[in-house]
Image: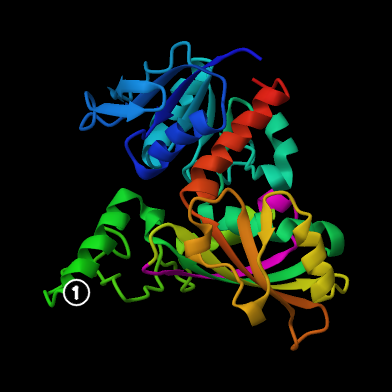
Amino acid sequence: MRDLNVAIVGATGAVGTELISLLKERSFPVKSLKLLASSRSAGKQMDTPMGTLTVEEATPDSFKDVDIAFFSAGGSVSKELAPSAVKSGALVIDNTSAFRLDPDVPLVVPEANAEAARNHRGLIANPNCSTIVMVVAIKPIYDRAGIRRIVVSTYQAVSGIGTKGLIALEEESRRYLSGQQVEPAVFPYTSAAVHHQIAFNLVPHIDVFDEMGYTKEEWKMVKETKKILGDPDIAVTATTVRVPVFRCHSESINIETRTKLTASEAREILSRAKGVTVIDDPSAGAYPMPTLGTGKDDVLVGRIREDNSIEKGLNLWVVGDQIRKGAALNAIQIAEYVVAEDLL
C-alpha cells in the first residue's frame, strides 16, 4: 500500500482536528499532510501527531499532487473548491451537505453501504451526523427483517455546529451558574433572527424551517436514510432537538419492521453488528449515555424493546459521538475502504 498525500480543508475546526488525530491513531498511510482553512487561519501553527504544521489558505490551486482531500469547512466552501480538487486528481470526501443528495455522488456509511463508494467520480459524501448514528444502528435490523417506517427524535450535542457551539455551552453555563445574565448568540444558529439559551435548555430547532414546519436537519435524516438504504419507499419522520451536551448525539428510534422481530432477536442481531456496542441492562442501570459514548468509535444501542402499540414494532435508544463517528471517523473509514479496494 503506497503512502498518500492528504489534505484537510477546515483543519482548524472541531472535525478537522479530529481528522488529524484519527489519521495517526488508525495508522492511515500518510506521506504528507496539508492543512487548509480560510484566510483568517492561514499561517497558524498546529501541533499534530505528524509534527508542527502551518495552516495554508484553501484555494483552487491547493490540491496539486493531493491524493485524498477531506472537506469539513461548510457547504459553500465545498461547492467552491471540491470541483477544483477533483480536477486536480484528488478524491474528495466531503463532510458537508453540499453533495449528499446529488444522484451522481455516493453517500456512504461504511457499515451500511461501503460498496456504494465503488461508483465514485472523484467525490464521496459523508452523511449528516444524526443520519450516520441512526443508520449504523438500524441497518442490521433492516437487513434481517426489513423496515417499513422509522420515527426518530434526536437529542443533538452542541458540537454539531462546531467549536463555537462547544464554547457557547461552556460560557453560558458558567454565566448562568454564577448568577450572571446569559446572552445567547449562537443557537439555534448564529444568523437566526432570535437566539435561545442552550445552557440548561432544549431547543427544538436545528437549521431552518420549511413551509411544512420541518427543519432542514429533519429532512436530511429523511432523504439521506432513503438514499443510503437504497429504499425510496421506507417511511421516515424526524424531530431534531439541540441539547446541552458537548459532543454525543442521542436518538430515540421507533421502527416498524416488515417481519416480526422480538426484542431478544433484535438484541442478538445488534450484538453481532459491526460498529455497534449493545449496552442494555436497564435493571442494572446500563444503557447508552453521552458520557459513555464520548470518544468511542462504535454507536451505542440500548433500551431495546418491543413497541406495545403495533405488531411489528421496536424501540431503540442510540448514542454516538457526533465529532467522531458522526463526522471524522466515518470519513476516515470511507478513505480506508477506498484504499483497501484500490479505488483511488
Residue at which label 1 appears: 176
Please tell me which residue lies in front, 210 or 55: 55
Q: Position of residue 185 (x, y in %)?
A: 21, 63
Image quadrant where one finds the N terminus: top right
Q: Secondary structure at mark 1?
A: helix
Q: Is residue 304 left or right of residue 178?
A: right
Extreme residue in the front direction: 284
Residue 218 vertical placement versus 45 (above, below): below
Over which residues does the magenta segment extend? 227-244
Q: Quadrant of residue 257?
A: bottom right
Extreme residue in the bottom direction: 309
Residue 104 vertical placement versus 305 (above, below): above
Q: Quadrant of residue 252?
A: bottom right
Total tally of numbered discs in the picture:
1
The amino acid on which the numbered mark 1 sits, given as a three-letter code, is Tyr
Q: Position of residue 129 (x, y in %)?
A: 52, 53
Residue 299 visible? The answer is yes
Residue at left 75%, top 88%?
308
